[in-house]
Image (cartoon, helix red, strand yellow):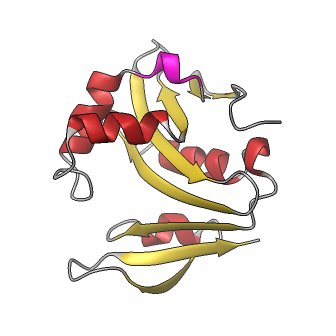
Amino acid sequence: MSVTEISSWTRHGFEINTDKSRLDMDSILKMLGATYWARDVSPDALSTSILNSRAYGLYSPDGEQAGFGRMVTDITRFAWMSDVYILPIHRGNALGKWLVETMVNDPALASVTRIMLSTNDAHSLYQHFGFKIIGSDDEQGRQTMQLKR
């Protein structure tokens, strides 16, 4: 399987899909623009980063963008998990766990032995999947986390 192949997973009427043509970029850019980690990044730069990553769109049963995440990866050894979010209206339904689980277990990234990320507010979510804090990222309290497999 290649990182450019489109993959799809379904659960309880929701779908995670890697087809970038399905992404609601306006919704994603609006949500990311409100986050602590991407609010200072231009919409053009965010769009380019999404298009050059393995993107995971999470869609509600009615087809609307309900969440998003992406992996920046060389497909063989390393990946950086980024921009993971669930829209507030869909939180509390374990969709964040499912999205992270899907990203970590994506067959297209099966040979990746190290996945890293940086967060200041979701440590327990990532620790559930084996990520460990390996250090501070910046003065804003972000922690760098790593999953070695």
Residues shaded magenta: 19-23
Q: Position of residue 80 (x, y in %)?
A: 54, 60
* In front of the other: 42 or 142: 42
In this view, 71 is above or below 20 = below
Q: Position of residue 55 (x, y in %)?
A: 53, 36
Whether 65 is among the magenta residues is no
Q: Where is residue 19 in the image (x, y as percent from the top left)?
A: 58, 22
Q: Position of residue 135 (x, y in %)?
A: 44, 87
- The image quadrant of residue 4 is top right
- The image quadrant of residue 64 is top left
Residue 61 in the figure: left or right of residue 87: right
Q: Residue at x 21, y 33 (%)?
A: 30
Task: Look at the magenta stretch and give its main secondary structure.
Answer: helix
Q: In which quarter of the image is the N terminus?
A: top right
* In front of the other: 12 or 145: 145
Residue 62 in the figure: left or right of residue 88: right
Q: Residue at x 66, y 54 (%)?
A: 74
* In front of the other: 121 or 113: 113
Q: Which residue is drawn at 58% across and 25% down?
A: 15
In this orientation, does residue 110 appear? yes
Q: In which quarter of the image is the C terminus?
A: bottom right
In this view, 108 is above or below 138 = above
Toward the top, the furthest residue is 62
- The image quadrant of residue 24 is top left
In this orientation, does residue 131 appear? no
In this view, 71 is above or below 66 = below
Q: Which residue is drawn at 80% across and 52% down?
A: 110
How many marks can you see?
0
